[in-house]
Image (cartoon, helix red, strand yellow):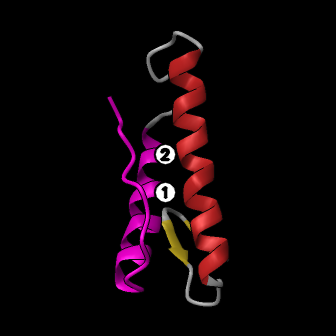
Amino acid sequence: MKRVGLSMNFSNSKDESLLWLWESVQRQVLADRAGGGRSRCVGDSLRAYAELLRSELNERELKYTPIDWL
């Protein structure tokens, strides 16, 4: 993965790797919620990263569970 600012290039990533990254974001959101804090760890940068990742998942037509950002 190449990172330039908030731009990420997932084109060389395998489908399995993208799904693993997405699940990692989900785990971070759930851990943050379980810790009782409202977005203590989950901030705008993680949301921006997740949006780029979600876009790539959709482009590849991969199945994933949406993140509940409450």
Q: Is residue 16 above or below residue 28?
A: below
Q: Amino acid at mark 2?
A: Ser
Residue 3 in view of the camera: no
Residue 24 bears which disc, if any? none
Taking the magenta stretch, the answer to whether it contains residue 37 is no
Residue 22 in view of the camera: yes
SS category of the residue bearing label 2: helix
Q: Amino acid at mark 1?
A: Tyr
- Alpha-carbon neighbours of circle 2 within 10 Å: few (<14), some, or many (≥20)? few
Residue 8 rendering spot, x and y as whole percentages: 54, 73
Quarter of the figure with the C terminus: top left
| Most distant residue in the top direction | 36
Residue 49 bears which disc, if any? 1
Residue 53 rendering spot, x and y as whole percentages: 47, 66
- Alpha-carbon neighbours of circle 1 within 10 Å: few (<14), some, or many (≥20)? some
Residues rendered magenta in the picture: 44-70
Label 2, on which residue?
45
Taking the magenta stretch, the answer to whether it contains residue 65 is yes
Q: Is residue 42 above or below residue 7?
A: above
Quarter of the figure with the N terminus: bottom right
Q: Residue at x 59, y 71 (%)?
A: 18
Choose top left, top right, bottom left or bottom right for residue 4.
Answer: bottom right
**Dots 2, 1 in contact, CB < 8 A:** yes
Q: Is residue 50 left or right of residue 40?
A: left
Q: Is residue 69 above or below residue 18?
A: above
Choose top left, top right, bottom left or bottom right for residue 10.
Answer: bottom right
SS category of the residue bearing label 1: helix
Compute the Cα span from label 2 to label 1.
Answer: 6 Å
Q: Residue at x 43, y 63 (%)?
A: 64
Q: Is residue 58 above or below residue 19?
A: below
Residue 49 rendering spot, x and y as whole percentages: 49, 57
Q: Residue at x 58, y 67 (%)?
A: 19
